Image (spheres, rainbow, N blue to C red):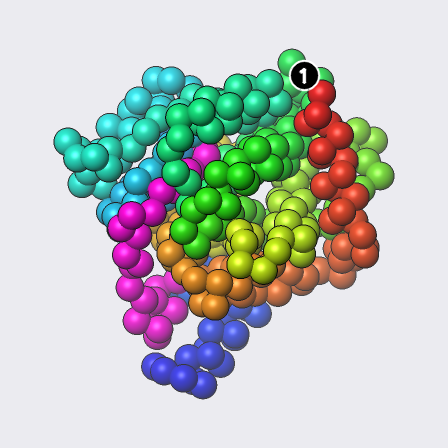
Amino acid sequence: MKGRAAGVADTAMDLLVVPGFSKIGYEARRRMYGWEMPDLTGRSVMVTGASGGLGLAASIDLAKCGAKVHMVCRNPEKGDQARAKVNVEGGVAGTEREPVLHLCDLSLVAEIRRFTADFLASGDPLDVLLNNAGVMPSERQHTKEGLELTFATNLVGPYLLTELLLPRLREGKNPRVIMMSSGGMYSSGFNISDPQLERKEYKPTTFYAHTKRGEVMLADEWQANEPAGGVTFCSMHPGWAVTPGMSAALPGFHKVTGPILRDSHQGVDTAIWLAGATPEEAPGGEFYEDRKPRTKQRVPGTSIADGDGKRLMDLLAGISAT
């Protein structure tokens, strides 16, 4: 199926949500459009949350496509295991493209500053940053720096990491920042007056969706302020992809939808494509799923007020300055 017919079918699946977000939509679109994996030879890509789930799948597929992968993980043991898996499944063991493992707790400002200082001092090039790390704890938790854990990991972390790595990214080839958001963000606006939702009862999915909406806002705000020819910023969602974290956090959803969930490699396909796409092929400021820009609004009452993107960025700058 090509041309207009494929476009109509694609749009219909997206509007119906279940076929569009599930492996049904992924497989249909892959066949309709004849997708191929990009050639990422010579590109250096950093993936956060790389020890499992989508981050590990992305690291493997990036290596298969020719990229040099920098894996950012919190847990040393899991990081070592993931790196070994990328070496084998990515086909890079014993080559100069063996992945580099970096340890960093992305919920902590001090850790991010330490890690980025070390990375910049290394002189290693960087062309793409995939901000994938995320958490959805079962109960309200706070970091030792006093921030709500979901907010710290899913928003403060990628904001500060990106800001500190921008000088190196701007030296790269076709530099890109990719925010791995979630289809769950469609259910949420962003409460700029209560960004950590301190006045709300804790519900994991609510807090998670709130931060995932914030990630889309960050990508849009960065893109709006980036000079022409600079870094391309975009956000995306993986569809309904099965990961260990999702299965643990949403056991009921997993039980009902299990047969149609995407595997982790299907979930990261768009991220791999974005890592090699030109600004003309995949413009910044868009929210992608299955290699196409998608709407950022589906649910009434979730729109973002003018200026809230800048307010969020200013807020995160203040928090991460301490």
The residue nearer to you, when weighing 41 against 302, is 41
Circle count: 1
Q: Residue at x 48, y 54 (%)?
A: 239
Looking at the picture, how far across and down is residue 290, in whole percent? 44, 62
Q: Tell me, yes or no, if residue 78 can be seen here.
A: yes
- Which residue of the protein is positioned furthest toward the top in this rendering? 144
The residue nearer to you, when weighing 321 against 192, is 321
Which quadrant of the figure has residue 28?
A: bottom left
Quadrant of the drawing holding the N terminus: bottom left
The residue nearer to you, when weighing 300 against 127, is 127
* Residue occupied by mark 1: 145
Looking at the picture, how far across and down is residue 267, in whole percent? 41, 51
Q: Residue at x 71, y 34 (%)?
A: 316
- Which residue of the protein is positioned furthest toward the bottom in this rendering? 4
As drawn, 127 above or below 304: above
The region drawn magenta spans: 26-49
Q: Residue at x 23, y 41 (%)?
A: 90
As drawn, 290 above or below 138: below
In the image, is 14 to the left or to the right of 103?
right
Looking at the picture, how far across and down is residue 144, in whole percent? 65, 14
Q: Tell me, yes or no, if residue 55 can be seen here.
A: no
Question: Would you say residue 42 sits in the magenta stretch?
Answer: yes
Give the amino acid type for the residue marked by disc 1 in the picture: Glu
Question: Would you say residue 223 sits in the magenta stretch?
Answer: no
Looking at the picture, how far across and down is residue 132, in whole percent? 49, 40
Q: Residue at x 43, y 62 (%)?
A: 278
In the image, is 111 to the left or to the right of 304?
left
